[in-house]
Image (tube, grey):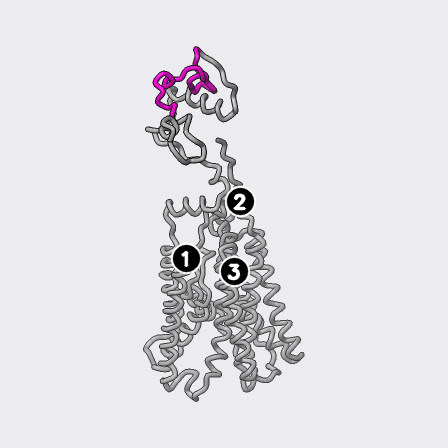
Amino acid sequence: MSIRPAKAASRSDDDAPSDRMAVHVVWEIGLLLLAGGVLFALTQSSGGPFAEGSWSGLFAALAPVIMLASALAVSLRVGAVNLAVGPIALLSAWMFVDASGSGSAMALGVGLGVAAFVGIVLATLTAWLRAPGWAASGAVGGAIGLWAGTAGDPGSFMLSELPHTGVLAALGAAAGVSVFFGLVGAFAGVRSRLAPIRDTPVGESHGRGGLVFVGVLLSSTLAGAAGVVAAWTAVPEGGAAALPDPILLTAVALGAALLGGTSLMGRRGGVCGTVFASALVLSLMWLAEARGWGFDPSWIALSAIVAGFLVTRLVEAMNAVDESERASTRRAGSLADLREDDPPPPDRERTGAYEDFDEDFAGLGSGGEWTDTGGIRTTGGIPKQAAVADPFGASGVFDDLRDSPRDGYGSPSDRRHGR
């Protein structure tokens, strides 16, 4: 029996079994509990955003951090880590502040437009020129840093401070975008399409250049939005605006993305982990500053990156599939599997002794004609006694059965005796 070979595309999809989301669910529950505990401790301290008993400072700082962490998580999922999220946020914030004299709509357009332009350049380098993400983003981030060092300060910020409702809207949008991308990445079909990017060596074609381009462009645009929100929520009283620190923002975003469960290897990630990890890292940094711990809070961001390496190893280890499970995953639901017969065991292999019986059964099934061979009628080789040969005719044993009534009453002996 012939077996048709499977297509190469379907084989690549079968080689990437569905990930186990349970490890992400358990880890995200732990992150939620940790973030809640640190936030409670922060509310009891005399420093940080709750020094005046207000949540507005926390929301204003958390929104851009979630945006930047989501930007890095998206780039990690498509296998092109964007280490230029901090410089892109700085560039967008600079352009937004400088164009604030033309109105909020123009300032938003300029700030987000320059981020999109940088995203197109970076996506071209990673998707079409196949440069590694860390190298391309490092070059773009370095170029932005050199420009910022010679550009000086932007003009005075001419817009009013973003109101409390606007801060809540920005935080809700940031969290919603992060959860939305996490849900989209949780579908098995999306992960299977991202699998070739993960499995293909750097520099070789994987056929997913469009996904990489869109992912890097989204990452850069989110980074630009984070820079705009950071500049709009930290309005100075006079003079030049306080622009965000690009290196610190990149470290915080990378630590939050990895700590939230996004794998450094690409493709794998959670749903709400980025939001919870961003709140945890930012709260820890503020708590260290409020309690007067004897180190720079920036070390917490670096510690989050190292902890993210361990989380990546945990995610990869819990999603490892052995060969038997991989084989069963490939065969499940395969039409070719229905046509494939398992080989018979050695003790049941056909031999030449059964060939005659096979031919007899084949002849019987095909309706072959009766033949007469030495008084024995056969069909397809199966012997049958001829009608004239009755081995029990002389004994008369079955005569009574032949003479029995058809209505089911009485017996042959009754008829012979007249009863």
Q: In x, y percent, where is residue 68?
A: 50, 69
Residue 241 appears in the figure: no
Residue 308, percent across and down?
39, 63
Residue 365 visible here: yes
Say left or right for 396 vs 114: left
- In this rendering, the answer to whether 312 lies above or below 49 is above
Which of pointers 2 and 3 indicates the residue nearer the eye?
2
Q: Is residue 379 above or below residue 289?
A: above
Q: Residue at x 45, y 21 (%)?
A: 360
Which residue is at the far bottom?
Answer: 52
Which amino acid type corresponds to the residue marked 3 in the rendered image? Ser
Q: Is residue 281 left or right of residue 365?
A: left
Q: Are marks 1 and 2 in contact (CB under 8 Å)?
A: no
Using the numbered discs, state the Cα–Cα distance from disc 1 to disc 2 in whole angstroms: 23 Å
In the rendered structure, which disc, 1 or 2, sits on the residue that comes first in sequence?
2
Single out the mark in the foreground, 3 or 1. Answer: 1
Question: Dots 3 and 1: beta carbons under 8 Å?
Answer: no
379 vs 187, nearest the viewer: 379
Q: Which residue is mark 1?
A: 20
Residue range (magenta):
374-400
Residue drawn at point x = 54 percent, y = 70 percent = 89
**Left or right: where does residue 305 sit relative to residue 71?**
left
Instruction: Name the mark on residue 88.
Output: none
Residue 259 colored in magenta in the image? no
Q: Main secondary structure of the magenta part?
A: loop
Rendering quarter of residue 283: bottom left
- The quarter of the image holding the C terminus is top left
Q: Residue at label 3?
A: 137
- Disc sitting over residue 9 in the figure: 2
The CA distance from mark 2 to mark 3 is 31 Å
Name the residue type under label 1: Arg
